Image (cartoon, rainbow, N blue to C red):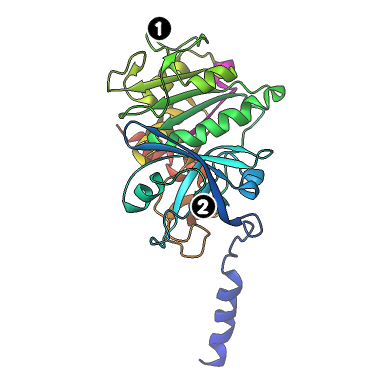
Amino acid sequence: MSADETPAVATRAMAAPAVDRSHRGTIFLEDDAEVLGQETWPGDQYVIRLRAPKCAAHATPGSFAHVTCDADIPMRRPLSIQRADAEAGWIEILYKVHGQGLRALSRLRPGDRVSCLGPIGRGFVPNPKRPRALLVGGGVGIPPMIFLAEHLRDRACDGFKPLVLMGSEIPFPFGLRPSTILVPGIPAGAIACHPLLDSWGVPSRLSSFADYPGCFHGYVTDLAAEWLQGLDAAALAEVEMYACGPTPMLKAVAKVAQRFGVPCQVSLEEYMACAVGGCAGCTVLVQTPEGPAMKRVCVDGPVFDANAVFPPGAAAGLA
């Protein structure tokens, strides 16, 4: 290298973006997390409860845990946290069996032990200036919406009024029942709800093309658009959307949010190896104030601003 090349190299080194390591010190390893219970639901779906007090104490809606499934399967699985009880020291995870690892996890029984790394990720950030929180969950994207709904219920003093919409093409991982809560703007025939949310006083409605009783027939994003369509300008100014589910659904959610001019936060689903930001295998393209950048879903997300991931021009072209 010549002497007059050195300043340029130094300049490039100084300009290199700093790696965000703010997640360090906030993720806990609990190698002896006890299985407290496991429920089985149709569609090869399970709800497992783990005693993981450190994870439970620090989990926030949108964060996830990286869990071992079997001693003979070295790779952990990233699983969204559905509920967490800091006082009792447990976390609850809803998952659908896909592959050998989760099949092994589904065989665990109370008293069995797993290794749990978590909580991981940046979760949802509710805005009290937009208290009409519209939560949209699809399939295995349902768990963070339940966690967020519980969190907003506990912040009722801040004025939050959540409405949870869920969609699934396989049986829902809970028993359906008619809601006891009236929701203006929802089609009259859509009365099925999530029983736990209903018992909390949080309104919810379900959608599917599978003709389940009491469910809205259509996409969950269509149901969201119907509800938003019934709001006047003042009410829309109080709405923020929060969503988790498959990428095509999140693109459709972003399109709905852009159509009605409301902000939206989305939780992305990506395959992960390390889940702590080291391997960069889960990066996605995100628009930032400094320009396009590759962000790690595991620790820079999984929650991002919808417009940053699905820019209005791109989302507008979606069906």
In the rendering, at what x and y percent does residue 20 appear? 60, 60
Q: Which residue is drawn at 46% across and 29% down?
A: 136
In the rendering, at what x and y percent does residue 178 appear? 44, 11
On screen, residue 266 above or below 3: above
Which residue is farthest front? 111
Q: Which residue is drawn at 50% across and 43% down?
A: 110
Cα distance, mark 1 to mark 2? 46 Å
Which residue does the numbered mark 2 point to in the structure image? 113
Q: Which of 102 and 259 is in front in this view?
A: 102
In the rendering, at what x and y percent does residue 5 appear? 53, 86
Q: Residue 319 carries which label?
A: none
Write the start and end of the magenta stretch as one range. Answer: 233-243
Label located before the other in sequence (1 or 2): 2
Question: In the figure, is residue 238 to the left or right of 253?
Answer: right
Q: Residue at x 52, y 92 (%)?
A: 2
Q: Which of marks 1 and 2 is in front?
A: 2
Amino acid marked by disc 2: Arg
Which residue does the numbered mark 1 point to in the structure image? 188
Q: In which quarter of the image is residue 24?
A: bottom right
Q: Quadrant of residue 160?
A: top right
Q: Does the magenta stretch include residue 53?
A: no
- Label 1 CA crowd tier, 10 Å (few <14, some 14–19, many 20+): few
